[in-house]
């Protein structure tokens, strides 16, 4: 019975993933615009961030949409297939769960943030419109 359930969900995922990805592409949010000097500052700060994600995960799609809406250049790392990014996520964060934002502080230490809502809240607080207005 477990095998049937497992194959059912794999088939469901195989059907829904292209639909989710197409919907994401068709409804891409417009990026916020910043002053070029603000954008350069944001780009420097986001160079220390990486999002570990699966392309078809609804929570990852939600997080990527927030990143695009905020106009952030955050490296996206696909942790779905066995490989380098999946191992980094397991070794650094301790578990294979996505989305996960790796935040490298100025001392080179990594902080691993899980949960889409927490990641989005962190990004909005740090790079949202209010932060851009304050730095002007």
Image (spheres, helix red, strand yellow):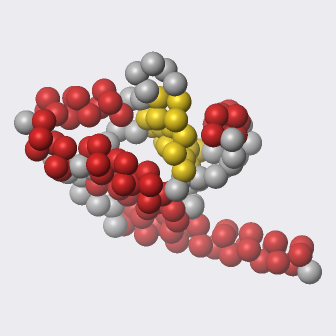
- Image coordinates of residue 129 in percent, x first then y, are 18, 50
Residue 64 appears in view: no
127 or 13, nearer to the observer:
127
Position of the N terminus by quadrant: bottom right
- Image coordinates of residue 48 in percent, x first then y, are 42, 29
Where residue 24 sits, quadrant-wise, is bottom left
Residue 52 appears in view: yes
Q: Which residue is located at x 43 percent, y 27 percent?
A: 105
119 or 56, nearer to the observer:
119
Q: Is 90 left or right of 117, judged from the image as shown?
A: right
Q: Is 82 left or right of 55, judged from the image as shown?
A: right
Where residue 27 sits, quadrant-wise, is bottom left
Q: Which residue is located at x 12 percent, y 41 percent?
A: 134
- Image coordinates of residue 33 in percent, x first then y, are 16, 46
Position of the C terminus by quadrant: top left
92 or 12, nearer to the observer:
92
Q: Residue furthest top?
A: 107
Above-or-below relation of 74 to 100: above
Q: Which residue is located at x 74 percent, y 42 percent?
A: 82
Q: Is 19 left or right of 129, judged from the image as shown?
A: right
Above-or-below relation of 83 to 130: above
> What is the total number of numbered labels drawn onto the structure image?
0
- Image coordinates of residue 91 in percent, x first then y, are 70, 34
Q: Is 100 left or right of 82, judged from the image as shown?
A: left
């Amino acid at each position: 019975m477990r095998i049937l359930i497992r194959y059912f969900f794999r088939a469901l995922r195989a059907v829904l993933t292209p639909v989710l990805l197409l919907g994401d592409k068709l409804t891409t949010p417009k990026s916020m615009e910043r002053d070029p000097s603000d954008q350069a500052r944001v780009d420097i700060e986001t160079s220390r961030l990486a999002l570990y994600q699966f392309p078809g995960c609804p929570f990852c799609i939600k997080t990527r949409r927030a990143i695009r809406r905020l106009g952030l250049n955050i490296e996206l790392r696909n942790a779905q297939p066995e490989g380098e990014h999946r191992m980094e996520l397991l070794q650094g964060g301790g578990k294979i769960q996505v989305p996960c934002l790796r935040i490298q502080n100025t001392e080179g230490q990594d902080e691993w943030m899980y949960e889409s809502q927490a990641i989005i809240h962190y990004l909005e607080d740090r790079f949202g419109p209010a932060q851009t207005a304050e730095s002007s």
